[in-house]
Amino acid sequence: MKMPPIYVVMNRHIVAANRKLPLEERQPAVRVTRGKYGQPYYYDEVIFHGPSQILNGIGEPVMPCGATLAIMTEGAVTLTARGREPVHLAACEPLDMAA
């Protein structure tokens, strides 16, 4: 069974809140889901290891969370967050393995 693509968006509310916090208290602001309606997971950085596409709604939402700009990939990714080991996720693996 083919897995849905991975979608990556920046959570602008977390980015704004992080500006007011010391570095050690900042939260990951990169929202990663498997499919448009998948469970969201948050990271500091995503490295793409395959083709990806930027989705621009030109002011209209492209994701159910309201994001108007997102990156979609069906390739592998590496997810990193402070205090956690990097997770390499193959295109065919479920995203919940990275939680």
Image: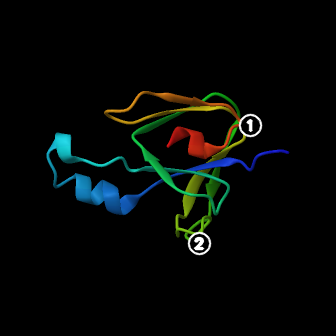
Looking at the figure, which quarter contains the N terminus? top right
Q: In x, y percent, where is residue 90?
A: 67, 31
- Horizontally, is 42 left or right of 97 in the view? left
Residue drawn at 71 percent across, 48 percent down: 5
Q: In x, y percent, where is residue 66?
A: 53, 70
Front disc: 2 or 1: 1
Residue 43's mark?
Answer: none
Q: Quadrant of residue 35?
A: bottom right
Measured in 3D between alpha carbons, the distance from the residue under mark 2 to the one under mark 1, in whole angstroms, is: 30 Å
Total marks placed: 2
Q: Is residue 4 above or below residue 66?
A: above
Residue drawn at 72 percent across, 40 percent down: 74
Structure colour scheme: rainbow
Residue drawn at 19 percent across, 46 percent down: 25
Q: Secondary structure at mark 1?
A: loop
Mark 2, other Cα within 10 Å: few <14 / some 14–19 / many ≥20: few
**Pick the front one: 6 or 52:** 6
Mark closer to the chain start, 2 or 1: 2
Mark 1, other Cα within 10 Å: few <14 / some 14–19 / many ≥20: some
Q: Is residue 27 above or below residue 97?
A: below
Q: In x, y percent, where is residue 49?
A: 64, 27
Q: Is residue 61 above or below residue 52?
A: below
Q: Is residue 53 above or below residue 89?
A: below
Q: Secondary structure at mark 2?
A: loop
Q: In x, y percent, where is residue 94?
A: 66, 43
Residue drawn at 74 percent across, 37 percent down: 92
Residue at image mark 1: 92
Amino acid on which the number 1 mark rests in the picture: Cys
Residue at image mark 2: 60
Amino acid on which the number 2 mark rests in the picture: Glu
Query: Pointers 2 and 1 in contact (CB under 8 A)?
Result: no
Q: Which residue is most to the right? A: 1
